[in-house]
Image (tube, rainbow, N blue to C red):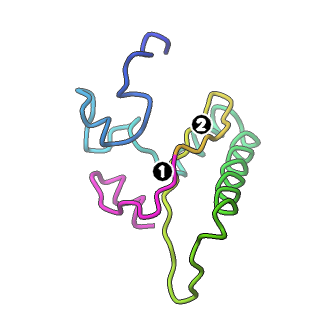
Amino acid sequence: DLSELDNELIHLTNVAIQKHSGEYSSGGTHGWKWSLQNLLSYIEGTRGLEAAETMMASIGWLIIHSLKAVQNVIINDKHCFECYGYDVMLDSDLKPWLIEVNASPSLSTTTTTDRILKSQ
C-alpha cells in the first residue's frame, strides 16, 4: 500500500518496533506473527504450491550460504549446539532477503503465538 510508505511501524515484524503502534495487540492478532505453517498455507493459497516450495528452497539456500560464509569462525564442539535466529524478509516476488542473524536469539515470549513458535 503506497499510502503507508511513511509508516515505519508496518514494514518490519520486530515486536520492539510494532508494539508502539496503536493497532498492535499482544494477543496474537492476525497479521503480526504467523507460524511457518500459516505462511506456507497463505503462499500456497495465493501463489500456488510451486511458489511456496521455491520460496522455502530459497530460504534454505540463504541460510546454508550464510553459515558457509562464517564456517571458519564457528566453534565446532560436539558437546554443545548453537541456536541462531534468522530474520528474513520476502519481497513481492517471494525472494528472501537476509536482514540479520542473531547468535543468541531471545527465547522469551510475548504472545501465545510466540510461545507456540519458540517451543517447537
Residue most extreme to the bottom: 79
The question of residue 102 being in magenta is answered with yes
Q: Is residue 96 above or below residue 21?
A: below
The question of residue 105 being in magenta is answered with yes
Q: Under tag 1, what secondary structure? A: loop
- Identify residue type, mark 1: Ser
Indicate the quadrant where residue 4 lies: top left
Residue 91 image point, x, y percent? 61, 31
Residue at screen point 29% across, 51% down: 111
Q: Is residue 63 above or below residue 43?
A: below
Residue 19 image point, x, y percent? 26, 37
Q: Is residue 57 left or right of residue 70?
A: right
Dot 2 alpha-carbon crowd within 10 angstroms: few under 14, some 14 to 19, many 20 or more: few
Residue for badge 2: 90
Q: Under tag 2, what secondary structure? A: strand
Q: CA distance from mark 1 to mark 2?
A: 15 Å
Residue at screen point 36% across, 52% down: 113
Q: Nearer the viewer, mark 1 or mark 2?
A: 2
Residue 67 image point, x, y percent? 64, 62
Residue at screen point 69% across, 44% down: 55
Magenta region, residue range? 100-120
- Identify residue type, mark 2: Leu
Residue at screen point 35% across, 55% down: 114
Residue 13 image point, x, y percent? 41, 39
User: Which mark identifies residue 48?
Assistant: none
Q: Is residue 18 above or below residue 68?
A: above
Residue situated in front as seen by the camera: 113 or 75: 75
User: Which mark identifies residue 35?
Assistant: 1
